[in-house]
Amino acid sequence: MLDTLKLPERHYLNNGHGLKSWLLTKDHKRIAILYLISISAFFFLGGLFAVGIRLELTTPQGDFFQPDTYNKMFTLHGVIMVFFFLIPSIPAVLGNFLIPPMIGAKDLAFPRINLLSWYIYVLGGLFALFAILVGGVDTGWTFYTPYSSAASNTNVIPTALGVFIAGFSSILTGLNFIVTIHRMRAPGMTWFKLPLFVWAHYATSLIQVLGTPVVAITIIMVFVERAFGFGIFDPQRGGDPVLFQHLFWFYSHPAVYIMILPAMGVISELISTFSRKKVFGYSFVAFSSLAIAVFGFIVWAHHMFVAGISVYAAMVFSFLSFSVAIPSAVKTFNWTATLYKGSLTFEAPMLYVYGFLGLFLVGGLTGLFLATLGVDVHVHDTYFVVAHFHYIMVGGAIMGYLGGLHFWWPKIVGRMYSEFLSRISAILVFVGFNLTFFPQFVLGYMGMPRRYHMYPDEFQVLNVMSSAGAAVLGLGYLLPVIYFLWSLKHGEVAGPNPWGASGLEWRTASPPPTENFAEVPTDIPEAYEYTPHVVREAKLV
Amino acid sequence: MAGPLPRNGPFRFQQDTPLVMGHVASKSMYYGIFAALMVLTWITVAVAYVDLGAANKAVALGIATIKATLVVLFFMHVKESSRLTKVIVASGFFFLAILVALTMTDYASRGFLPMPPGLQ
Amino acid sequence: MFSGLPLFPEQASSFAADVDALYFFIIAVSAFFASLIAILVLIFAVKYRRRHDQEVGAPIEGSLPLELAWSLIPTVIAMVMFAWGAQVYYDLRRPPAEAHQIYAVGKQWMWKFQHLEGPREINELHVPTGRPVKITVTSEDVIHSLYFPSFRTKIDAIPGRYTTLWFEPTKPGRYHIFCAEYCGTMHSGMIGTVVVMEPAQYQAWLSGGAGEGTLAEQGARLFQDLSCNTCHLETAQGRGPSLKDIMGKPVQLTTGESVMVDEVYLRESILNSQAKIVAGYTPLMPTFQGLISEEGLVALIEYIRTLSPQAATAPAAAPAPPVEAPAPAPQGDRN
Amino acid sequence: MSDAAVHTGAHGHAHHPALQHHFDTMQQQKEAGVLGMWLFLLTEILFFGGLFMAYTLYRIWYYDAFVAGSLELDLFWGTLNTAVLIGSSLTMALAVRAAQTSNRNLTMAMIIATMVLGTVFLGVKVIEYEHKFAVGLIPGPGFVWHGNEALGRNVQLFFSLYFTMTGLHALHMIIGLGIMTVILWMTWKGRFDAEYYAPVEMTGLYWHFVDIVWIYLFPLLYLVERHN
Ligand code: HEA
Ligand code: HEA
Ligand code: CUA
Ligand SMILES: [Cu+2]
């Protein structure tokens, strides 16, 4: 039956040819592809810096790179991975591609702004690349003052402007999603029929809209201090460097939920598809996304427990930090419960889901160590923190991103990739990941500070393990590039709904036509409805 | 699937909340608000010259807030707008308040000194 | 090199064990939840794997009691973590009054330590066991962070401000000092060693190392060199107020307010004297901002402290008696 | 119109020319636009919010310096500008009203009036800035302070905030003037009518927002403590 499948004659990919048709497109799906290409490039660039970091850290002495070079590498690694890869990743690629079809719309509310936001992103990226080309920047991705505003003599300004500009891209994407979700839903698509992916993106967008402007203005303040000698954060000029940290983390803590919430949305979709079952406690999962988004705004100073804030403020923020753990716990348990009495299969996307569950759990639980004051004083700014956030950002968010990419790839290009290779890659990523980052928890508790170019000898064994793991991990990331590219030409034709999934986006051709649906569905079912009937229907055509 | 689905009824998008759009306010309302804003500006300047102690700050900010509220409600038509718009406006100020209030918990409790140690 | 993987840093301070206990508690909680989820996921994966093509999952919507259970139980556990963590933190941040005072100044890229008894050290710090040590930390340039992994404590060194940290070493030995806040090129080179000694050896070390006189003596010299003494006489006859017996007492300002004289106030008075004017005087003291190094400042303050004998104690050489905390209540908050 | 065959593009006879293909009705398009604009203004609140946070802290810390700095500002110009900007908000509101009632000439007149008032505001700002420049109150290496020496550094900080805040505000006005130029041209071309005037309305929202920022900046910067 499968070999009778054919690609649709007319779809968004062949509706217009040539570079121009891509660069001027207003189709959210094509813009998603533009994002996919550009963020992948940045991912590998960021990965390249990670390779440099891990290489240097195989030996205690600083023998591969100059200290300044090392400092620039982790700074650029962090800046690129956070601002140019992970923050745009799922929203700008999968969200952009899928939200309109998921809610039965023809496009996002503002297609031109959508394209504009990609150009803004590219412009920001060019600033960052420019900063790299003229010598890099060495402040750490956190840009702490007064180092960034008065002491560093690297290219802080172009990098900061790059981040500032990319921030607007993020704001516009978020704004576009919120309006789209409010105003573009097809008739019958009520709030509680929305896929959880959409809920997660709604929550994410709120953070983007509310938080990003604060980091933007903070960057402006660093800029005027550095460029014109205005006094704002520099203690020599009467400023308080700790105020910078407050403003920075007011955005950057919520920003970590910009990174994880969309991944959580992906997981909800995948888990229900591959267990052919409703997500357990739909409304709890939906509202926990909003709760995470809102609570995310009241915990920021947990990055500053030893930064000279008052003892009482530290206690307040420690207390509040645990509030985000509860909705995260709710999600985790609901996903687990969804598996109960499901009909489970183990294609590559589902392997990523399992990977996500495990790694996010470790990442989230180690967040609790950090939120606990007594422990954080010791492990703050050590590799324990590095391990914590890689577990969530790489183990959680990227697992979610890759899972989503594998899941929707047939929808995006209309063809399947190699099932075998994709499973291998999922396993490589999981194993390599743990080998890379688990030793770092131990290193951190032993006291190895982060951002160290050289370190005492006794830390070497664990560091070598970590570097070895990174090699495996890198391989795991390279593999999908190969089989995804291969699938473009040679993959089996997937058909509209290869997984037998229930979302609206599977009810149109793969790849979808430019306007998403030949005929906009009007019989909107409950979310995740899997009855034997539905499944039989889905397999046809 | 992908077969044509039954289309029942006109294709209309949902609305979350009814929006009152295109409501034309009277000109005199605009003039009235303008006059109020001017008078408030005059008051705030005049009051600044009177020593009210700590109340000066409160009055200045209070008047500014009244003025801003007038602009938001009438010039920007929020008074007749959907609940969603109102929620958006409110949340802007709400999250700003979070930023300021929680940051100040740190500064206010850094000791009983009004100044940061060692500065000024 | 492969002689066993060390997993924990040495426990060398009085609260290292407390921090580790808390750490193990959270590990236990985490292990419980992690294995709970892992086991459930594995069981479900095996038990409910798809048997035939058309199979679908059971139509389960959710369960309110379960939702409540798995939000309330973690809440309770989280509160325990918070409370315990806050307790440990509170101890970590509140130096006991009798703590032995040391000053530390961070500077790209070294740590300078200054003992009251005189010795100065760079990237090395000698402390005795069995006595709480309080370090007052600041920075001359950017933010650094003074980190003693074996004591389980650290604090950022912030330019323009004093922060404090304390510990009570329990075990003689040599342990790492790290700079934990990224501070530029040689951040990873800003490391040192803390040498914990038995009290007797420590005394021996002290008497061997005090070349430049005690801190207060250095301060006294500076007081002359910067001609502070031209205005500040022993009596109140000078152009400036007498600095005798001012420590720890309130002083009346021209604004009518009164402030407590402590390190922070002294620092401000010296660097930026015009900010607070002592009642009865004119603001003619020059600002010394930029003219005195952080270390000089520390010495001056220490000297002024010794002018108030009942608030401070004679700095004299060994054996150094405990030094009073400079100011009452609000002191500890100023971290 | 609601039954339009939206998928076949915009050939439906009843379609308003401004209706974009992915919207079903003008109403839907307008609601989307207005919602988007409000969300944008939401980001603006937090954008300026960061500055207000810094201002709050330093004003508490360095109250005397803020008083001294504030007294350096010319209250006459500040008050004048407040009045000018409020006036421009009025004309802007009237422009939107004129667009709502399809009064093209009045719309244009009111937009022009708004632009003139906006330019006056910027002109006054230039005068003020120039004066600060002349007396050396530009923060940075060239800063000159003749008042109480001890306050100098912190007065400089006041002026850092003053220039950042008013500078960003002025930048917003310049952008606003640019947008209004486009809107004016579109009005002139007859693009708007009672059914479609969303761009005018959104420009209005933006302009009023800029006005609100100033409504706060004015007392915070100019009126710190005038009564001594
Ligand atoms: C996607 C990114 C992401 C996410 C989602 C998180 C999530 C969390 N983070 Fe993390 N964090 C980072 C990215 C992220 N973090 C980064 C990048 C840094 C370092 C920045 C830098 O300095 O460079 C950092 C640093 C960081 C610190 C500062 C450490 C330091 O510098 O000293 C703290 C402190 O509280 C913290 C806490 C938390 C907490 C409590 C959560 C919570 O949201 C986690 C919630 C999840 C769970 C708790 C798991 C599920 C729950 C259960 C299974 C039930 C059991 C639960 C209980 C018993 C309560 N994080
Ligand atoms: C999304 C975010 C993200 C991602 C995906 C990663 C991915 C990785 N990160 Fe990183 N990381 C951060 C965000 C992220 N990181 C942040 C925010 C910091 C803090 C920065 C700071 O302190 O300011 C940090 C810091 C950081 C450090 C600490 C540096 C220090 O403090 O001194 C380390 C050390 O091991 C590290 C390692 C890695 C590794 C091994 C990966 C791996 O997962 C990467 C795997 C990918 C590859 C290996 C690329 C694959 C491609 C190839 C193999 C082809 C390359 C071509 C050639 C080699 C020719 N990261
Ligand atoms: Cu000093 Cu890092
Ligand atoms: Cu955080």
Image (tube, coloured by chain):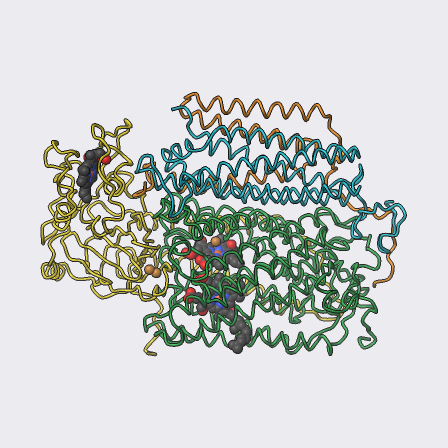
Chain colours: A green, B orange, C yellow, D cyan
Residue A322 coordinates in the image, percent (x, y)? 48, 50
**Nearest the camera: A228 or A465?**
A228
Residue A114 coordinates in the image, percent (x, y)? 68, 55
Residue C35 seen in the figure: no
- Residue reaching furthest to the right: D13
- At a point 19% along the width and 58% down the height, the residue shown is C127
- At a point 45% along the width and 37% down the height, the residue shown is D131
**Nearest the camera: A187 or D147?**
D147
**Nearest the camera: A361 or C298?**
C298
- At a point 51% along the width and 24% down the height, the residue shown is B44
Q: Is residue A287 left or right of residue A29?
A: left
Residue C112 seen in the figure: yes
Quadrant of the rendered image containing residue A86: bottom right
Quadrant of the rendered image containing residue A358: bottom right
The quarter of the image holding the N terminus of chain C is bottom left
Q: Is residue C166 left or right of residue A287?
A: left
- At a point 31% along the width and 35% down the height, the residue shown is D148
